[in-house]
Amino acid sequence: MRWKWVVLATLPSLILSILFFFIIHMKSTPMDNTAPEYRPRSQARFSILIGILTRPDGYDRRHFLRLVYGIQSSPIAEIDVKFVFCNLAKDMQKVFIALEILRFKDIIILNCTENMNAGKTYTYFSSLPRILHRQYDYVMKADDDVFLRLAPLALSLMPLPRNDLYYGFVIPCASQNPFVDYMSGMGFVLSWDLVVWIGDSCIPANDTNGPEDKLVGKWLKMGNKAKNRFSNKPAMYDYPGTNGRCSHKLIPETVAVHRLKRWDQWLNVLIFFNMTMFNGISLDLQAQKT
């Protein structure tokens, strides 16, 4: 009987040893079977902050866009999507948006009065170096009526310079020359050094009223900045039939579709790009049994 007591006495130590070995083995074993889109963000080659400029009362649009961007990712880029607006003016906003911040942590509130062409974009870029706890390789300003495809966006940025970069859809619509004027406000990208320059330079600070996308191009020209420019046509465009020569049909290589003002337009875009596909399988909700 003595050997049974010896076994019982040593059993806890034996179990702990087995558990310790199992934990160490699991930590040291690479998990190579993870799909690329779900790999750790530490494997990303570069980082992008996408600031979607919207208004505080746009609750439904923000929740919808969280769905649209929450199911997208890129194996080569760390992409953070944030919603950007000015100071809250209503008690309802302060309560409802506080709940959004607690739940989603994806809102940036700027110290400004809500506006479109009276300095909001300047406040956005100039504030980031001061309010963020980190820096990104690229910062994007986007409208809330644009659909961005994050993986193609990242692929288009990967070979481009990380400094002095100005990227987007050049205006006028018919031009292919990224130096001819400025990038459309639908969505344009600046490298981090240009974001810092906007915050430090007196050129933007003294010229903040007017069409925000046109002003950004003006600032960069006056400051002799953005020597690296890239206009991603035809991958960026306005929704078919909404804006003359800036519009064309939906195409597979799309990075951005702008002027999605109606739900039927969003529906057509999401269907065209198979946004309800999961691991190659279409989620036909009508075929699901209740």
Image: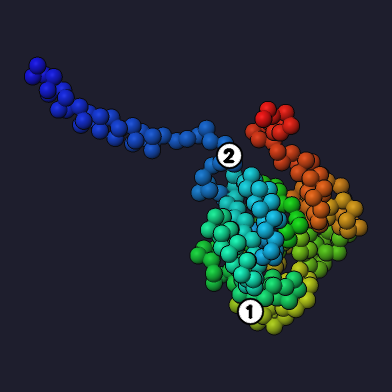
Q: Is residue 42 above or below residue 102?
A: above
Q: Residue furthest top?
A: 1
Residue 164 x %, y %: 65, 66
**Residue shown at 87% from the left, 51% from the top:** 240
Contact? badges 1 and 2 (CB < 8 Å)? no
Q: Residues within 10 Å of mark 2 (few under 14, many from 20)?
A: few
Residue 200 seen: yes
Tell me the amino acid under the disc marked 1.
Ser
Residue 105 x %, y %: 55, 58
Dot 1 corresponds to which residue?
A: 201
Task: Left or right? Give the position of 118 relative to 100.
Answer: right
Label 2 secondary element: helix
- Residue 54 or residue 148, whichever sits in front: 54
Dot 2 corresponds to which residue?
A: 36
Q: Is residue 201 above or below residue 286?
A: below
Residue 62 x %, y %: 67, 56
Q: Quadrant of residue 37?
A: top right
**Residue shown at 68% from the left, 48% from the top:** 68
Mark 1 against mark 2, which lies toward the viewer? 2
Tell me the amino acid under the disc marked 2.
Pro
Label 1 secondary element: loop
Q: Quadrant of the C terminus?
A: top right
Task: Left or right? Give the position of 155 relative to 259.
Answer: left
Comes first in the chain, label 1 or label 2? 2
Task: Left or right? Give the position of 32 relative to 165.
Answer: left
**Residue shown at 78% from the left, 67% from the top:** 182
Q: Is residue 180 above or below residue 266?
A: below
Q: Is residue 11 above or below residue 215?
A: above
Residue 191 seen: no
